[in-house]
Amino acid sequence: MDKWIAFASFMTAAASVCAELSPEWQKTTPEACGFSCSTRTVVSGVKDGLMANQTAAFQKEIDDLSASGGGTLRIPAGEYVVSSLRIRSGVTLQLDRNAYLYGTTNECEYVRYVNKGDTAYSVVYAEGATNVAVVGEGVIDGRGRFHNRHRDHKLYPGWDDLYFQDCKNVRVENVTLRNASSWCCFFRGCDGVVARKVKIFNHCSWSNDGIDIESSNVLVEDCDIDSEDDSLVMKAREPWRVVENVVVRNCRLSCNAEHIKIGTESLGSFRNILVEDCDVACRTPKCATGGYLRVPGVMSLQTALSAISVFVVDGGSLEDVTVRRIAVGEGIITPICIRYAARKERQSPGEGFFRNVLIEDVKMSAPSASSVACSITGLPDKRPHDITLRNVDLVFKGGGRAKDAAQKITEEYPDRYPAPYYIFRSTFPAYAFYLRHADNIRFENVRLRVTDPDEARPPVVADDATYEVVP
């Protein structure tokens, strides 16, 4: 497999992680491979109208196109109901402006097309396909607001808008995705993904993610994501899964959970990840629960857990991650969260590691929404190391008093969700960064401010951790 991200060494003081698209990668992109050079284009003959599920008619046209060597199925303006519409190899699904694909609200009409993990249904999907795309200025609307996933005190499977499983050369461009019952757009086990100028609004359920990445050789750029749960998240849910060579850039992200997240599901490995030039802020009030109001200092439902989160807590590994040039706006409970731990019920065999993370050129334009500090924490036998924060400007709400500064954290809580307050149920003895069981943490030109004039905690506290401050 061609490597299309090159990272400079992280191990010397003068070096920094540097990720660039190489000329070799261009040879493997869908565009360079002649992808979507259609043998023929078919305009769908399916009539619009919301009365009946029209999957069968669309599916026949897709199957015929694929069997004849591939091409583009163009969906003209109109309203259509579909469920588990499967894109075959060589087929591009083009949604014209004012073309709407609505997911059926009857969960029995969806096909359980995979039996791995908790995502088993989708409005549109591809599995084991090569050279597939969803493009155009139309809309896929899952109508998830009509599906109660949380009934009878149980969590029932929901459906995504788009799902790609074990595909090669995938492109999603310009389309609008909204109102999924579950996650909105999921790339799982794919090799070669381009998601460009995708617009997502997903606020029907507390589990509504934006884009989920569990693939390699991925480019996500110029996307607008507003989601109830995580905005853009990378996962490795099997021990053998490697999520690598991922670039995310020039995106506008808004959510009520974590905006840029690597983990939490981390049985496998993450390496060669670059996220850059993104804007994050919480712009839409939380619709599902009021749970965040229990976090000290939080006064509004329009809040998100974090701007940047890096979590390896299931036994996996992580190395060579860069997050840079991030503008952080309002409603962020804790700006930066880093955690290396071991959830008791989800352990991979072998030794994992957590190393070489660079976060640089991050600037907050509004104070954090809580009294809870950022944290870089591990366990006595699982220690994140070689983590650099460079040219970072953070402003904190504060609110800590003498008793908070004097508190001693004695329990490790390895099995709790890794967001800072969820781990320790504490504001931490520092107002900016709490470091625990971590090595070689480096602060270079980091500015930490607090708005509460009575804040009694120091900016940084290290508990069994080593760090260096460089002006």
Image: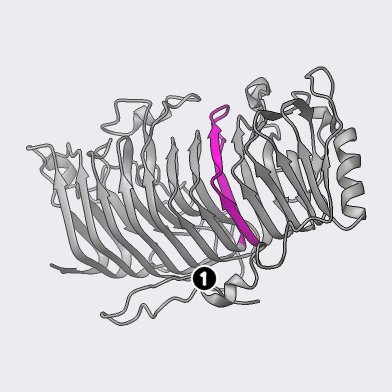
Per the rendered image, the range of residues in magenta is 192-215
Image point (17%, 36%), residue name: 399
Does residue 167 appear anywhere in the picture? yes
Q: Residues within 10 Å of mark 1 (few under 14, many from 20)?
A: some
Numbered disc total = 1
Examine the image and state in which quarter residue 207 appears.
top right
Q: Residue at x 26, y 47 (%)?
A: 373
Quarter of the rendering containing residue 76: top right
> Up-down: is 347 above or below 306?
below
Which of 290/382 is in front?
290
Vertical side of 419 occupied by 294: above or below: above
Q: Tell me the SS state at disc 1.
A: loop
Query: Residue, x 48% and y 41% (percent of image)?
Result: 224
Q: Residue furthest top?
A: 51
Front residue of this view, candidates 418 and 130:
130
Q: Is residue 163 magenta?
A: no
**Residue 467 percent across, percent down from the top left:** 23, 68
Q: Does the image show residue 121?
A: no
- Above/below status of 11 relative to 464: below
Residue located 77% across and 26% down the image: 80
Seen as rendered, the residue at the extreme left is 453
Residue of label 1: 352
Q: How is the image coloured?
A: one colour
Q: Residue 225's spot in the image, x, y percent? A: 49, 40
State the residue in front, 334 or 346: 334
- Amino acid bearing label 1: Gly
Question: Residue 259 location in percent, x, y?
Answer: 43, 45
In the displayed structure image, the side of residue 262 where residue 239 appears, left or right: right
Q: Which of 22 and 406 lies nearest the eye of the viewer? A: 22
